[in-house]
Amino acid sequence: MIPFSHHQLAERIAKDIPEGAYVNLGIGLPTLIANYLPSNKDIFLHSENGLLGMGPYPEAQQSDPDLINAGKEPVTLLQGGAFFHHGDSFAMMRGGHLDICVLGAYQVSATGDLANWSTGNPDAIPAVGGAMDLATGAKKVFVMTNHLTRDGHSKIVETCTFPLTGLACIDRIYSDLAVMDVTAEGLVVTEILADISAEALQALTPVPLMFAATGREAKHE
C-alpha cells in the first residue's frame, strides 16, 4: 500500500477549494495547501494571527521575519493582502466569515467530532489556540490527516478518546488513503487515493464506511 504523500494530499485538497473562497489553513499539514492553489483563482487565505491574502511559502532569500502565519512560519502576502489586529481576526473566525477551514487531527469520530489540540498527555502544552473557534465558526470544516497513527491505529474512530476540539463540526475528511464525507447516515468514501481496495480500507477503519459508487458498506475481509 502506497499512501498519498503530504504534498500530494495538499494538492488534492486545493482542487476542491472554489473561486472566491475565504479559507483558513490550520497549523501543520494544512499550510502546505497554499503552495498548490491555482494562480488563476481568487482564493483568500486567512491566518488567525491577523492576515488575509496570504500566498505560498516564500523562497529562503525572500523570507520576512515580521510576516508569519499562526504557526510562526514565514509566509508571503499577495497584492491586496492585509494584516490587522488579533481581535479582528477572531471576529472573522467566530462571525461565520470563513467559507472553509482545513485542520489537522489526532482523531475524527464517525459523527464528525474533532480532537486535534491535545492527546491528553500530562506533559502536553495546554493550549488549544484558535482551533475551537475555527471548528465552530467556519461554514465548512475539512480535516487533512494521515489515516493511521505511527503505531498503526486509525485516526478515524467511533468515538474520540482525546480531548475534543468540536462536536459534529467536520464536513469532510481527507486522509492519505481516501476522501470521506461526514453525513447523517455515516462516513461516505467519495474517492480512494491510495492503491488500496474498498475492503482493505474498511479493514483499517473501525467504523462502517459507505462508498459513493454503490452506496453500500464494504464487506469486512
Image: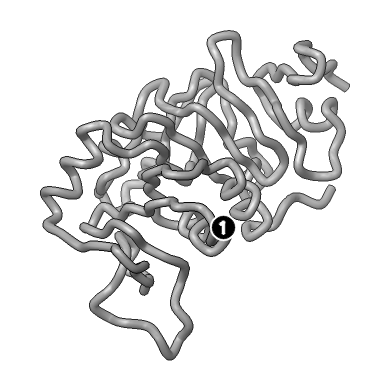
Rendered residue at 36%/74% (across/down) = 74
Left or right position of 117 against 89: right
Question: Image quarter for residue 76?
Answer: bottom left
Question: Which residue is most to the bottom?
Answer: 61
Please state which of residues 210 and 57 is positioned toward the viewer in this rendering.
Answer: 57
Q: Name the image colouring.
A: one colour
**140 vs 74: above or below:** above
Q: Quadrant of the C terminus?
A: top right
**11 vs 217: above or below:** below
Rendered residue at 35%/29% (across/down) = 166
Rendered residue at 43%/34% (across/down) = 141
Question: Image quarter for residue 168?
Answer: top left
* Residue 103 coordinates in the image, percent (x, y): 44, 44
**90 vs 32: above or below:** above
* Residue 62 coordinates in the image, percent (x, y): 40, 86
Rendered residue at 64%/39% (across/down) = 153
Left or right position of 77 against 93: right
Dot 1 corresponds to which residue? 38
Please state which of residues 77 and 198 is positioned toward the viewer in this rendering.
Answer: 77
Please state which of residues 15 and 152 is positioned toward the viewer in this rendering.
Answer: 15
* Residue 109 coordinates in the image, percent (x, y): 51, 25
* Residue 134 coordinates in the image, percent (x, y): 31, 39
| Mark 1 residue element | loop
Which amino acid is tagged 1? Pro
Question: Image quarter for residue 82?
Answer: bottom left
Left or right position of 46 against 181: left
Q: How crowded is mark 1: few (under 14 residues within 10 Å), some or many (20 or more)?
A: some
Callout count: 1
